[in-house]
Amino acid sequence: MPIAAPSLARTAQLFHALSDEARLQIVAILLDGEHCVCDLMTHIDAAQSRLSYHLKVLKDAGLVTDRREGRWSYYTLQRDAFLEAEELLAGLRPRAGRALRASCC
């Protein structure tokens, strides 16, 4: 069964967010739990503006959430979004036993 267009758009959004090494580094750091932006800056070799961009991409995809406390923002992973990504990826898995189609020409 083909993937519906809205699911394709969501799949692209999630996997685009996870397609960058810096963003994967951020995700790996957040696996241990919530972290402040200042903590992330010490682990990621990027200027604050670049880190903010990566966090925005992850946040827009729903992979992370943030909360403000004073002048700091704290980020945490959204487990449901990762479960969704697993399901979407499973929908792209080739099905076993699928017969090869005859040549189109």
Image: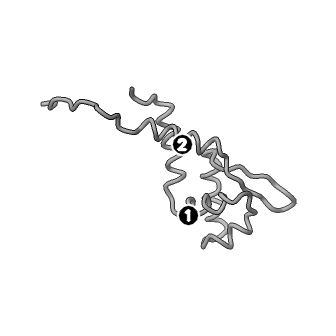
- The residue that label 1 is drawn on is 22
Residue type at the position of mark 1: Ala
Mark 2 surroundings: few (<14), some (14-19) or many (≥20) residues within 10 A: many
Looking at the rendered image, the quarter that the C terminus falls into is top left
Q: Nearer the viewer, residue 96 or 7?
A: 96
Please name which of the two marks, 2 or 1, marks the residue nearer to the observer: 2
Circle 1 crowding by C-alpha within 10 Å: few under 14, some 14–19, many from 20: some
Q: Residue furthest right?
A: 70
Relative vertical location of residue 51 with respect to residue 13 in this rendering, above or below = below
- Which residue is painted at 14% across and 32% down in the image? 103
User: Quick one: SS at disc 1?
Assistant: helix
Q: Residue at x 64, y 63 (%)?
A: 29
Query: Residue at the spot x=51%, y=59% of the render?
Result: 20
Counting from the top left corner in percent of width and height, residue 5 is at 46, 30
In the image, 42: left or right of 15? right
Q: Which residue is mark 2?
A: 85
In the depicted view, which residue is nearer to us: 23 or 83?
A: 83
Rendering coords of residue 83 (x, y %): 58, 41
Q: Where does residue 28 sit, x and y in percent of width and height?
A: 60, 61
The colour scheme used here is one colour
Query: Which three-letter amino acid code belongs to the residue tagged 2?
Result: Ala
Q: Which mark is residue 56?
A: none
Judged from the image, the secondary structure of the residue bearing numbered disc 2 is helix
Number of numbered discs overlaid on the protein picture: 2
Q: Quadrant of residue 39 in the image?
A: bottom right
Mark with earlier residue (2, 1): 1
- The quadrant of the picture occupied by the N terminus is top left
Q: Position of residue 22 (x, y in %)?
A: 56, 64
